[in-house]
Amino acid sequence: MKIFESKKELNIYLDDIRYKNMKIGFVPTMGCIHKGHLSLIKKTISENDIAVCSIFVNPVQFNNTDDFKKYPRTLDEDIAKLESANCDILFAPSEKEIYPEPPVEQYNLAGLDNVMEGKYRPGHFNGVVTVIKRLFDIIGQCNAYFGEKDYQQLVIINHIVKQLSLPVNIHSVETCREDDGLAMSSRNILLTIEERKAAPLLYQSLLYVKKNIRNKPPEKLKEDVKTKINSNPLFKLDYIEIAHKDNLLPANDKIINPDLYRVFIAAYLGNVRLIDNISLSD
Ligand code: PAF
């Protein structure tokens, strides 16, 4: 695996690859590589000639400095995992390389950032789009792969790619889960043994909503989940929401076509904030 720290060198190298008519696949990450990332890499390798992964813990998408400091950084292990997955290129830039000056971009995200994560993490999505736009400019024309675990992020990135006519095709990949249903996430390693045992309650709550979506109104289902989660002292629920899969608007009335909706959850388990979502289609 070739490792680049310089955006200029990577950009020139990839231009040469494109000149040879080879397809470039790109997986942006913040590192602490797990099986979920590796499934994105695997898909990238199968659909492209060259697989590029980036590792950059992006300071401007953290609305909480403590969360940024605590975010796991495991570069040596990540390199070993990417190498054994046959990833071709790793881009691991420094903060100065991506942000020579403090970034000032402000994106219009068409209100997609006013709900769920956007409500609880002000500025988060502007920070995500700021780094993604810079990474896409460095990588150039490519297929880019994102996991559905961060579904709101996926919708927002799709929006910005269309709005700015970026030469990038976005591909979504299903969430990878542990055997007990917990969505794979870099933050899972921060859970204590007791918290890790309790964590599948989030996925179980999503399944409960999916199972009952035709019999109970959204408000009742959300109330049921709130009661259940709040009865466990390890959790602090941020939100449970049922929202349209494209415009992310919350469903208030009884849902006629569950195929168009997803259910989303975010909660603190101890000090670790976890998110998850699933489609309501059968
Ligand atoms: O999903 C992530 O890991 C990050 O939000 C991303 C897309 C790499 C941007 O920093």
Image (cartoon, rainbow, N blue to C red):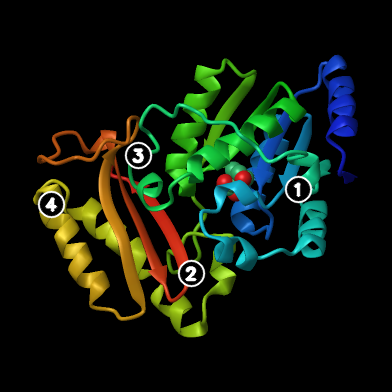
Residue 272, numbered circle: 2
Q: Residue at x 43, y 47 (%)?
A: 122
Q: In the current view of this chain or complex, which residue is farthest to the bottom?
A: 194
First in residue order: circle 1 vs circle 3: 1
Which x, y percent locates residue 77? 78, 64
Which x, y percent locates residue 211? 21, 54
Single out the mark in the foreground, 3 or 2. 3
> Mark 4: few, some, or many residues within 10 Å (few <14, many ≥20)?
some
In this rendering, position of residue 60 left or right of residue 116: right
Note whether 59 is above or below 169 in the view shown. Answer: below
Give whichever of 109, 146 is nearer the camera: 109
Residue 219, numbered circle: 4
Respond yes or no on whether mark 2 lies under 8 Å from ligand 1.
Answer: no
Label 4, label 1: how many angstroms apart (C-alpha)? 43 Å
Callout 3: SS = loop
> Mark 3: few, some, or many residues within 10 Å (few <14, many ≥20)?
some
Q: Residue at x 32, y 36 (%)?
A: 248
Q: Is residue 174 visible?
A: no
Task: Give the residue type that dot 2 points to.
Answer: Val
Note whether 85 is above or below 127 in the view shown. Answer: below
Respond yes or no on whether mark 1 lies under 8 Å from ligand 1.
Answer: no
Which x, y percent locates residue 69? 64, 65
First in residue order: circle 2 vs circle 4: 4
Please give the residue where the numbered disc 1 appears in the rendered image: 95
Task: Give the residue type that dot 1 points to.
Answer: Glu
Label 3, label 4: how many angstroms apart (C-alpha)? 20 Å
Residue 114, numbered circle: 3
Task: Give the residue type that dot 3 points to.
Answer: Asn
